[in-house]
Amino acid sequence: MHIIEDSKMEKGDLERGDFATDDITTAKNQEKSSGENSAIDIESGSQDDTTKSTAINDESTEASTKPSSPQRSTVLLTDWDAGHIGWDSVDDPAYPQNFPSSKKWRNVAFIAMGSFIQPFASTLFAPGEVYLADEFGITNQSLLSFMISVYLLGFGWGPLLYGPLSELFGRKATVCGSLLLLCMMGIGCSEATNGSMFIAFRFLSAYLGSAGSNVGGGTLADLFERDKVGMASSLFAIGPLIGPIAGPILGGFVAQSIGWRWSYRILVILAAVLCVAYALFVDETNQAVLLRRKTTSLKKKSGRTDLISILALKRRHVPFRKVLWHNMSRPFRMLATVPIVQCLALYMSVVFSYLYIFFTTISPVFEKRYGFGTGVTGLAYIGLGTGLVIGVATIARSNDNLVRHLTKTRGHGERKPEYRLPPMILCSILIPVSLFWFGWSVQQRDHWIVPIIGMSLTGLGMIASLIPFQTYIIDVFGPHGTSASATAAVNVARTTVGSVIPLLGPDIWARLGYGWGCTTLAFIAWAICIPMTFAMLKYGTKIRKLSNL
C-alpha cells in the first residue's frame, strides 16, 4: 500500500507520526514526490477534518483508481488487504465533497441558521438591560455593559470544548447537544432572581450553546473544495453578523411590551425548533466519524475484527485523555507560537472590540440623547445591518473571483492565500471613519439619522474583514487539518478582548465625550490595522514560512 501526502505536519503534534503504525511513516510533499512511493502521516487530532490532501493507491487496484482534479483534495481510499477502511472510490457518494449540490446547500442553510442564533442571542437582551437594572437595582454602567459583553467571552471559549467533541462524536450530534444546553441555560436566564445569577447563566448559555457557530466552519471545509468555499463561507458569515443586528431590533419591542425575561423565552423556543430541524435535516460530514461508522458496519457484515478506519490508525494506541488534551490545547499553542495566527488575532481583536463598543453604546445614546423609547432604540441597529447587507452583496460574492483574478494577473497561475486579504484594507479605513462619524455626530447632537448612517460603515468594514479572515484561515490551515484550531485561537483572543474593551466605554465617554473618545479609538485602529494589513499582503508568504506550517 502506498499513501501519498501533500503537506507537512506540525512538529511535536499527534499528527507528527509519534503514534503511527508500522504501515505509516512521514513523507515529503506530493509535489516533491511525484512518481515516488511516499507515505503519509495521517491527521487525527484536528478539530475540522480538512485532512491533508491524501490518496491511497493499492498495487492491485491502482489502475482502476482515477486521479482527482488538481483543484480538489484527493481521497482516502479503502485498502481491504491491510484492513484499512476509507472511501470506496474518489466518486464515493458518501464522501461529503461528493454530496449533490442540493444536499450541500441544504446543509449550509441550516449551518447558517445555527451560526445565527448565538450572535442573535448575544444582543437580543441589550435593549432590555434598563428594565433588568430597575428590577435588580443595578446602577453601575460598567456592570450593565459587562452583562452584555460577558456573552462574547463565553462564545469565544466554546470552541475549546466543542472542537474536540465534534471530532469524537460528530458535528451533528455536537450541535444538537449544544442547542439543547442553550435551551436549558436560556431558561436559567429568564428565571434569574438577581444580577449575579443572570450573569452566570448568560455566560453558560454562550459557552455551552456556541457549537453552531464554532463547528460550522469545519463543516464547510468538509463539504467544499478550497476554491469553491468562498460563497459558502459568505453565507455562513451572515449569521454572526446579522444576528447581533436583528437581536436588539426584536429585543427592544419585546422588552418594552412583555418584559425582558421574554427575550430569553423566545430564544429558548427558537433554539428548540432549530435543534429538532438540525436533527432531521442536517447530515454528518466529519470524515473521521463517517469512516468510523462505516468500519463498525463492515465489521458486522464481514466478520473481520481487524478492520480499522484509516483515520483512526494513529490514535488507536493513544489514551483518550491525551487526544482530548492535545486538541483542546492546540489553539493556545498556535496562539503562542504561530506568527500568522498572532497577527490575525490582534487584528480581529481590534475590529470586534469596536463592534461591541457600538453594541453597548447605542441604547444609552439613542435613549438619553435622542429620547428614543426602548422599542424604537432597537431600530437604530439597522444602520449596522445595512452595512452588513451591502458587504455581503459586494465583498462576499466577489471573494472567490478576486482570488482567481489575482492568481492569474499577479501569481502567474500560482494561488496564494494572501489573495483573500485585499478587502481588509477597506475594513482598516472604514471602521475608524465610522468612529469619527458616529462620535462627532452624537457629540454635536446632529439628526439621529446621521450617526445611524455612520454606523453602516462599521457593518461594511466587518464584512470586509470577516470574510477574508475566514477564507484565509481555511486556505492556510485547511491542508494541515488545523483550520478549526486556528479559528478557535483567533476567536479566543478576539472575544476575550472584545468582552473587556466595551467596559471602558462609559469611562471614555465620561472623560473625553463621544467626539474625542471615538477619535482616540479611531487613531488606535488606524495605527494597528492599516500597517498590519499591508504587512500581511506584502510579507504574508514569509510570515507563513515563519509559522512552520
Image (cartoon, rainbow, N blue to C red):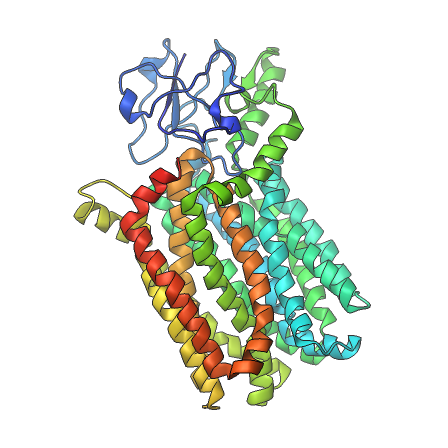
Q: Quadrant of residue 6?
A: top left
Q: Is residue 80 above or below residue 528?
A: above
Q: Is residue 312 above or below residue 131?
A: above
Residue 44 percent location from the top left of the image? 52, 28
Image point (56%, 74%), residue name: 505
In this rendering, position of residue 148 left or right of residue 288: right
Residue 350 percent location from the top left of the image? 47, 62
Quadrant of the image containing the N terminus: top left
Residue 15 percent location from the top left of the image? 49, 27
Tally of numbered tags: 0
Viewer-proximal residue, 261 or 101? 261
Res. 448 in view = no
Q: Is residue 170 above or below residue 518?
A: above
Q: Which residue is outermost to the front?
A: 511
Viewer-proximal residue, 266 or 435? 435
Res. 339 in view = yes
Quadrant of the image containing the C terminus: top left
Q: Quadrant of residue 395?
A: bottom left
Q: Is residue 114 above or below residue 315?
A: below
Image point (33%, 64%), residue name: 426
Residue 379 percent location from the top left of the image? 54, 78
